Image: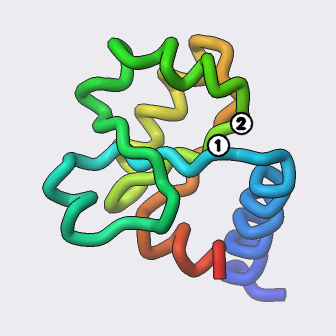
Amino acid sequence: MGLFSFLFGNKKNQTQQYINKGAIILDVRTQKEYDARHIEKATLIPLSELKSRLQEIKRLNKPVIAHCASGIRSSQATQILKANGVDVINGGGINTLKKVLE
């Protein structure tokens, strides 16, 4: 198994485990980015609004797969959510997550 398969195989397995647990897909990009292209049924909460909308996510009482355009904002979102007791993984950038969800 090559490094690429190892890395993305694990991400796919972890993502699938979260999907199986009923996870929501949280898009932390801007509204404009979301309107241009998004994952079906993803919930949009831009990173800039995340802290003020934490209770909204917590009320869902579901695990979360956070994603953005490249993985940087979703990494920040993952840190914020974990620090506030949310079961979350970083799904990375939209292209990566779309491939994993296929």
Residue 54 in the image: x percent, y percent? 47, 16
User: Could you tell me the amino acid type at mark 2?
Assistant: Pro
Say which quarter of the image contains residue 100. Answer: bottom right
Disc ID at residue 48: none
Does 50 sit left or right of 61 as displayed?
A: left
Q: Is residue 85 above or below residue 70?
A: above
Disc ID at residue 63: 2
Q: Residues within 10 Å of mark 2 (few under 14, many from 20)?
A: some
Residue 13 in the image: x percent, y percent? 82, 65
Q: Residues within 10 Å of mark 1 (few under 14, many from 20)?
A: many
Which quadrant of the figure contains the C terminus? bottom right
Which quadrant of the figure contains the N terminus? bottom right
Say which quarter of the image contains residue 8. Answer: bottom right
Q: Secondary structure at mark 1?
A: strand
Q: Which residue is mark 1?
A: 89
17 and 92: which one is in front?
A: 17
Q: Residue furthest left?
A: 32
Does 1 sit left or right of 46 as displayed?
A: right
Write the residue at 76% across / 56% down.
Answer: 19
Q: Are marks 1 and 2 in contact (CB under 8 Å)?
A: yes
Write the residue at 85% across / 55% down.
Answer: 20
Q: Separation of disc 1 and disc 2 at Cα?
A: 8 Å
